[in-house]
């Protein structure tokens, strides 16, 4: 359990640092907007609670897809197709940007620690 907390702490620390990057902020805001709008649409169209709708949105974008909830109306199914095409790419961009920022910082830290041969 300790490793989980340490990993969560590292993630939150890196997330906070990454918010300083305007591109990362834009991706994050777009992702949050997509999650909220998806939750509202699924809640209205499928009659799910907002929490169930948000849960479905997160499971869909993270490609976990538990299958407990699924769209039942044609409109929801069409929306889901569009939501997945746009959302998975946005979610992937978010993760890549977050990991890339950490990798660049880690690389600079290593360069500072390694003595040069000059």
Image (spheres, rainbow, N blue to C red):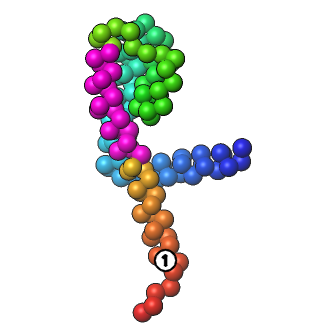
Does any portion of residue 110 appear in the rendered image? yes
For the stretch drawn in magenta, what is the main secondary structure? Answer: helix
Work out which quarter of the rendered image holds the N terminus and state it. top right
Q: Position of residue 51 (x, y in %)?
A: 50, 18
Q: Is residue 91 above or below residue 113?
A: above
17 over 43 or under it: above or below? below
Residue at 42% across, 46% down: 95
| Magenta extent | 77-95
50 vs 85, nearest the viewer = 85
**Residue corresponding to mark 1:** 112
Q: Position of residue 90 (x, y in %)?
A: 33, 38
Outermost residue on the right side: it is 1
Identify which residue is drawn at 31% across, 42% down.
Answer: 26
Q: Is 73 situated above or below 38?
A: above
Instruction: Tell me: 49 left or right of 37.
Output: right
How many numbered marks appear? 1
């Amino acid at each position: 359990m300790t490793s989980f907390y340490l990993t969560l702490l590292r993630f939150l620390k890196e997330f906070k640092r990454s918010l300083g990057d305007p591109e990362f902020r834009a991706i994050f805001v777009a992702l949050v907007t997509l999650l909220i709008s998806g939750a509202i649409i699924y809640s209205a169209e499928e009659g799910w609670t907002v929490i169930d709708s948000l849960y479905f949105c997160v499971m869909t974008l993270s490609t976990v897809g538990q299958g407990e909830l699924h769209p039942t109306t044609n409109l929801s199914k069409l929306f889901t197709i569009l939501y997945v095409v746009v959302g998975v790419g946005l979610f992937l961009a978010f993760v890549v940007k977050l990991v890339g920022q950490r990798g660049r910082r880690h690389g600079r830290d290593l360069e500072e620690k390694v003595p040069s041969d000059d």
